[in-house]
Image: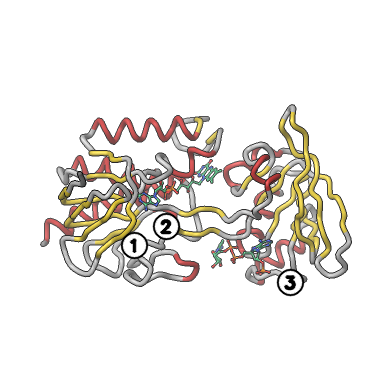
Amino acid sequence: MTKNYHTPTLIIGSGPAGYTASIYAARAMLQPILLQGLQPGGQLTITTDVENWPGDTMVLGPDLMVRMEDHARSTGVKIVQDSAVELQLDHRPFTALCDSGDTYTCDTLILATGAQAKWLGLSSEDYYKGFGVSACATCDGFFYREQDVVVVGGGNTAAEEALFLTNFANTVTLIHRRDELRAEKILQNRVFNHPKIEVLWNHVVTEIIGTDNPKSVDSVALKNTITGQAITHSCTGVFVAIGHTPASELVTGQLTLKEGGYIQTSPGTTQTSIPGVFAAGDLVDSVYRQAVTSAGLGCMAALDAEKFLAKS
Ligand code: FAD
Ligand code: NAP
């Protein structure tokens, strides 16, 4: 039998943003309920070493997220293994309909459903994820000291990832499917003028090639998009930087979104276009996309929700 629950603050998402929001909300006596979604713990559960979470020189991503969940539980957060499938935000209380059939109503809603990196869609890419294939140079660049790496993409992210990787790698080859980048001119100039970066125009990756034991990458197979010619390029790291998809489909048409589908929030706050609905983490952030920035935005969302409830 399906059930209906009410809470002053419902949080959707169990990444760093959601768990941090829930801890602050619980300590503000908002009796939060948190819906974990299909990926309890969020994106960090699919990585290994996290070396930039303050206070831990190195922590495994899944371990860090278990600790966050334990912390949230210890403050009294009600954590539910369920996914929101529909949101009704046109009147308060807001309503979330869940996959299980249960319904949650709430006076304030914190959205923390994150974003997912776009991938090329190759089975070899999937096979070597975490073993030579990454979508986050900030997270994994350090592991490629004095190695040869490639970055796939032609936008700001690809340009920034390529530049960042020059801090570690011997060579960085930027592979782009067209003959011009869509990255800002200033980034393009930095890329073109960097002695460690070479741009390979008009090429797409058709396969990622490596070994099974140990599981590691040694090259990529490429195809020229104009001539069709196939080549192989040696590298030990492949950074896919072809964009991110924020998980905003639940609120499309209800909340104001910005370019790329990220949720628009008022500057300096987590307030969305509907009063009482707040958004945090990678769902609002097209620029930084880090665990610590997501946690910070989660904290802000809970404080914003507390202030909103105090006024209403
Ligand atoms: P996410 O972690 O994306 O979590 C989103 C949550 O929302 C999930 O729990 C999901 O189940 C839930 N959800 C989605 N839809 C629904 C729904 N309909 N109903 C209920 N729940 C829903 N950052 C670093 O700072 N350091 C690193 O070393 C690092 N390494 C990374 C390695 C990899 C491979 C990846 C992919 C990312 C890495 N990042 C790293 C980035 C970091 O993981 C993200 O910035 C961070 O996880 C974003 O947190 P978030 O809470 O906004 O969202
Ligand atoms: P993006 O601007 O959408 O660029 C994605 C790039 O990947 C494009 O060059 C695209 O090629 C290429 N691409 C897409 N799918 C591909 C595929 N299947 N195979 C090969 N290449 C593929 O994404 P982004 O660079 O992540 O940026 C997203 C948003 O964040 C943008 O608005 C960007 O300005 C912003 N951002 C800003 C900053 C900053 O201000 N410093 C930093 C990072 C991101 P085509 O060009 O051919 O389409």
Marks 2 & 1, CB-CB < 8 Å contact: no
Name which residue lies at 58% across and 56% down: 118
* Left or right of 168, for residue 27: left
CA separation in Å, label 2 and label 1: 15 Å
Neighbor class of circle 1 (other Cα within 10 Å; few <14, some 14-19, many 20+) is few
To which residue does mark 2 refer? 283
Q: Quadrant of residue 107 in the image?
A: bottom left
Image position, residue 187 (x, y; %): 66, 65
Circle 3: residue type: Glu
Label 1 sits on residue: 268
CB at disc 3 and ligand 2 closer than 8 Å: yes
Q: Quadrant of the C terminus?
A: bottom left
Q: Which residue is drawn at 71% across and 47% down?
A: 238
Q: Residue at x 29, y 51 (%)?
A: 98
Under tag 3, what secondary structure? loop
For marks 3 and 2, the one nearer the N-term is 3
Question: Ligand 1: does it lie within 8 Å of the C-beta at label 2?
Answer: yes
Quarter of the figure with the N terminus: top left
Amino acid under disc 1: Gly
Residue at image mark 3: 180
Q: Can residue 53 be seen by looking at this rendering?
A: yes
What element does badge 1 sit on?
loop
x and y, in percent, of residue 102 in the image: 24, 49
The residue nearer to you, when weighing 233 against 188, is 233
Q: What element carries label 2?
A: helix
Q: Which percent across, then down, holds residue 306?
A: 18, 53
